[in-house]
Image (spheres, rainbow, N blue to C red):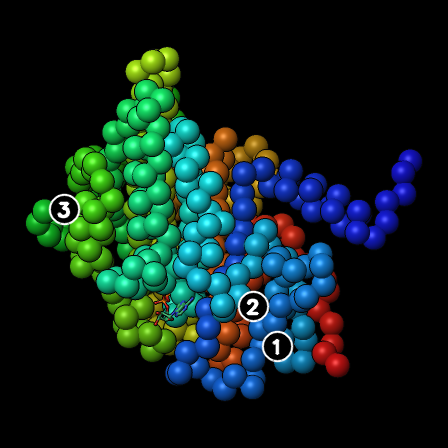
């Protein structure tokens, strides 16, 4: 029997959690305050500076209570798009080694999901994870040519709106068209018949595709954000590699997913169709959380089939696939309730909410 104290116990616990979680990581990103947000003096988000929590801890104050959370990485307001990409570039690259990778952005509308995933079009330094990831994939695949590797890549972009799939690369709009998700015979892959699949040879082509997809993406209106995205946006790059020297073959998949806003019914002020839409979003986000939670806990039954998103991504979640969830947080004092919900969702996925709420002094 070994007594482990202080720092080493925390390290051991953290390592055990990582082991339990397998290939699931959770990063948190807090966006800067914007002019329309509440006053900076009411700042509710803080970052603990103790050695063990540095870069991994976040605290949120609400109604005199302080809530502490810990993730695999926490980016504060100053983190640039490049800083964030640096942390995920290895993960992205593993798709070239044949891994199935899913990167999600989760959070309420206006918390910075699209900024993180797509960035600001036309401003190269503000490019988000999707364009940066694809540039890197193409760059690395070119450099592997010397070692005999030849890659072919195919992209598709779809959205799931109210549990209905829409093809965002369809050459012509076909509103009534129904898309189904089919599992192949061995259950290792899913595909959507009739979905537009585009062969891509370079990152430039991808940016054109992304523009096309962005135009098609449905946007709804809620009281919270005139341009709020009410659908899950799923960009998929399928990578097939063959080494002409060794005849080794790899099949990797990179899924980059900008999830629909996670705001609760009361906050969204939704009624009628919008209410049903919000309910569908909340249900599918909760299905995603159930799936990741079951995978992290290595449960026998993983409820993949409870939503379109998890059904579609089933082959890329679990097993030796790799999952990264960004939880995006708005520092706006009026968003504290939603931020706390987002952090709790992420903590459930991360299995490591730390600390019991304590009174602020
Ligand atoms: P969401 O996709 O979650 O609805 P957005 O990505 O549209 O949110 O972000 C909301 C607003 O905040 C946008 O104006 C966006 O440009 C800005 N924003 C988000 N994250 C950042 C950041 N890290 N730095 C600067 N501005 C940001």
The quarter of the picture where the C terminus appears is bottom right
The alpha-carbon separation of the residues under discs 3 and 2 comes to 38 Å
Does 359 sit left or right of 72 as displayed?
right
Query: Residue 25 location, x and y as percent?
Result: 54, 46
Residue occupying image coordinates x 64% and y 38%:
19
Tell me, for residue 62, which label it has, or none. Answer: 1
Circle nearer the N terminus (2, 1): 1
The alpha-carbon separation of the residues under discs 2 and 1 comes to 9 Å
Residue occupying image coordinates x 89% and y 38%:
2
Q: Is residue 323 visible?
A: yes
- Along the line of sight, the residue nearer the viewer: 149 or 329: 149
Q: Are marks 2 and 1 in contact (CB under 8 Å)?
A: yes
Residue occupying image coordinates x 47% and y 84%:
38
- Along the line of sight, the residue nearer the viewer: 246 or 184: 246
Which quadrant of the figure has residue 274? bottom left
Residue occupying image coordinates x 61% and y 65%:
58
Secondary structure beneath label 3: loop
Q: Which residue is mark 3?
A: 170
Circle nearer the N terminus (3, 1): 1
Q: Are marks 3 and 2 in contact (CB under 8 Å)?
A: no
Q: Which residue is mark 2?
A: 340
Secondary structure beneath label 2: helix
Mark 3 CB lies closer than 8 A to ligand 1: no
The alpha-carbon separation of the residues under discs 3 and 1 comes to 46 Å
Query: Residue 202 location, x and y as percent?
Result: 22, 40
Is 266 drawn above or below residue 18 in the view shown?
below
Q: Residue furthest left?
A: 172
Circle nearer the N terminus (3, 2): 3
Does 265 sit left or right of 62 as displayed?
left
């Amino acid at each position: 029997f070994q007594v482990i104290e202080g720092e080493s116990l925390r390290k051991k616990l953290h390592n055990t959690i990582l082991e339990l979680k397998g290939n699931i990581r959770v990063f948190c990103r807090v966006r800067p305050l914007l002019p329309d947000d509440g006053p900076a003096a009411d700042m509710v988000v803080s970052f603990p500076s103790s050695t063990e929590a540095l870069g991994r801890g976040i605290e949120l104050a609400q109604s005199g209570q302080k809530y502490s959370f810990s993730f695999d990485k926490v980016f504060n307001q100053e983190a640039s798009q490049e800083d964030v990409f640096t942390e995920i570039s290895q993960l992205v690259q593993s798709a070239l080694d044949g891994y199935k990778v899913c990167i999600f952005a989760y959070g309420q509308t206006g918390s910075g999901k699209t900024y993180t995933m797509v960035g600001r079009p036309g401003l190269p330094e503000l490019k988000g994870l999707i364009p940066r990831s694809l540039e890197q994939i193409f760059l690395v695949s070119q450099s592997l040519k010397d070692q005999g590797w030849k890659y072919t890549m195919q992209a598709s972009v779809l959205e799931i709106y109210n549990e209905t799939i829409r093809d965002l690369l369809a050459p012509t709009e076909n509103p009534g068209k129904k898309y189904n998700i089919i599992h192949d015979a061995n259950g290792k892959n899913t595909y959507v018949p009739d979905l537009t699949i585009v062969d891509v040879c370079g990152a430039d082509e991808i940016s054109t595709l992304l523009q096309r997809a962005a135009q098609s993406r449905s946007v709804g209106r809620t009281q919270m954000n005139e341009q709020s995205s009410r659908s899950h946006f799923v960009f998929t790059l399928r990578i097939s590699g063959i080494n002409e020297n060794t005849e080794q073959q790899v099949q990797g998949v990179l899924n980059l997913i900008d999830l629909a806003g996670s705001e609760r019914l009361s906050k969204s002020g939704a009624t009628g169709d919008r209410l049903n839409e919000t309910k569908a979003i909340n249900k599918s986000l909760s299905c995603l959380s159930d799936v990741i939670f079951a995978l992290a806990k290595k449960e026998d039954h993983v409820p993949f089939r409870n939503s379109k998103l998890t059904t579609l991504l089933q082959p890329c979640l679990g097993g030796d696939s790799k999952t990264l969830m960004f939880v995006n947080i708005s520092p706006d004092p009026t968003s504290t309730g939603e931020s706390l919900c987002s952090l709790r969702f992420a903590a459930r996925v991360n299995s490591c909410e730390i600390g019991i709420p304590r009174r602020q002094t």
